Amino acid sequence: MTGPDTTHDHSDENRRQVLYWRLLARLFDPDEQPALETASVAVVDDLGLPAALLDPAVSVDNVVQRFPALADELRGLLAPAEADAPAGTGAPTDPTDPAAGAGEPDPVGRDEVRRAALVSKLLLNVFATGSGAVTAGQLAGWQSDAGWFEQALGFGPGELRRQGGSGLGGTLAGLEGDLVRRMRLREVLADPALASRLTPSMSLIEQLLRDKANLSGVALANAKALIRRFVDEVAEVLRTQVEQTSVGTIDRSVPPKRVFRNLDLDRTIWQNLTNWSPDDERLYVGRLYYRQTARRTTPARLIVVVDQSGSMVDSMVNCTILASIFAGLPKVDVHLIAYDTRALDLTPWVHDPFEVLLRTNLGGGNDGPVAMAMARPKIVEPRNTVMVWISDFYEFGRSQPLFDGIEAVHRSGVRFIPVGSVNSSGQQSVNPWFRQRFKDLGTPVVSGHIRKLVFELKSFLT
């Protein structure tokens, strides 16, 4: 009696290896390796997949338009799943590892080979960005391909790039930023047809804000339209986070509103158990109990101070939008100050982050004490005030004066919140000298995840 035939299994495993080795070869060297190309074409053809999957010049969008059924296969293709975890580890296997077949893996089937072909397409189009000048069309194409890669990982298009940080999100944002820098942006903005192909991103907005003084006419109008689009998109995301963050102390002095959605069913049943009738097999309810939902609200002042030096661009963009959202909450008085070597009071425009960004000048050094001198007079009732200071706190000789001012504000009763960055999840390098002193003061630096800052603010303001 012979064992099971494993020839087919090994054949599929070898074909998957061919696709991944071909991917690695193309990522490190744009020139084709004839043997790998020929073998890969044969594999893709045998799978019934389009040859365009092997051509990095063809966008993922283009492939999906020609073969709509592939769209569902691509979405979630790389998302972690319990089934992918090796026994006892709980960790998903790396779907992009060409050596994944080493050791004694489970037999590789035809579906895994097909998956390898799709994964290779995504990785090649996103990570093989080449060199030299970039057109608006090429940037738009890369952004679209990156969007499909993000969907394969279980994110929305652009969501992972907005997270930044030191992981995959930061890598994607870095690639996008490099493409933007290689593009002749002023020429693109001067052509409405080319400008319309640009998709707003943090990298693009940073370049626009840095170069806005050199733009005029059509180019300036197109730049403003892109900034407005980006502001509106980010504001929608942040507004949802603010609305979903439920904090604040229940006000027990306010009677609960007697409506069905506030009905405390568990308590009502428990308190009426003595009314249970064994004969009727019914529970007779003598009294209904409702949950108290009213929360204490106190008129509060929020003072946001933002370092607008070159290292804090994403923070400047995100915090101005966040400040405008909180400025729209009832009984919250928001003040916004931006600084580098000078301080600028942007409070009159705090409700419109677009106008705030047009008035900022990114870059330059740091002079925190100048910003503190502008912020401190805004403190009227210390115990009813929160001051958010967003910076990497590299002050170059002005560290002690700034910390002295911060310490005095904190001792007066102001809730002081130091923030290293305000992006979606990234970590910002913060001056260790300040980090330790904030920790000793009892005001540790918020780690940069924007939802943390939203929670901190809502817990104070509502």
Image (tube, rainbow, N blue to C red):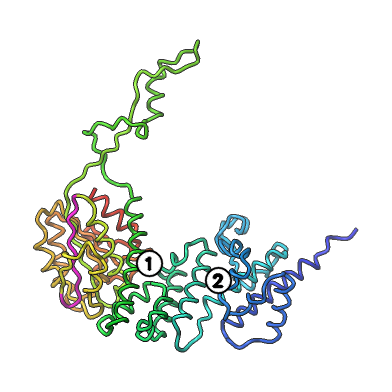
In the picture, measured across the screen, residue 24 lies left or right of residue 362, that is: right
In the picture, measured across the screen, residue 36 lies left or right of residue 330, that is: right
- Residue 273, percent from left and from top: 41, 19
User: Which picture quadrant has residue 225?
Assistant: bottom left
User: Which picture quadrant has residue 119?
Assistant: bottom right
Q: Which residues are magenta?
A: 331-342
On residue 328, the disc is none
**Gap between marks 1 and 2, in whole Å?**
29 Å
In the rendered structure, does residue 121 fall within the stretch colored magenta?
no
In the rendered structure, does residue 334 fall within the stretch colored magenta?
yes
Check contact, mark 1 vs mark 2: CB within 8 A.
Answer: no
On residue 426, the disc is 1
Question: Can you say whether 2 is above or below 46 in the image?
Answer: above
- Residue 274, percent from left and from top: 40, 16
Question: Can you say whether 252 is above or below 148 in the image?
Answer: above
Predominant SS of the magenta segment: strand
Query: Which residue is label 2 attached to?
Result: 61
* Label 1 CA crowd tier, 10 Å (few <14, some 14–19, many 20+): many
The amino acid pointed to by label 1 is Gly
Q: Please tell me which residue lies in front, 180 or 266.
A: 180
Asked which secondary structure carries label 1, the reply is loop
Question: Can you say whether 217 is above or below 103 in the image?
Answer: below
* Label 2 CA crowd tier, 10 Å (few <14, some 14–19, many 20+): some
Q: Please tell me which residue lies in front, 460 or 330.
A: 330
The amino acid pointed to by label 2 is Asp
Q: Please tell me which residue lies in front, 140 or 326.
A: 140
- Residue 344, percent from left and from top: 16, 72
In the picture, measured across the screen, residue 388 lies left or right of residue 64, that is: left
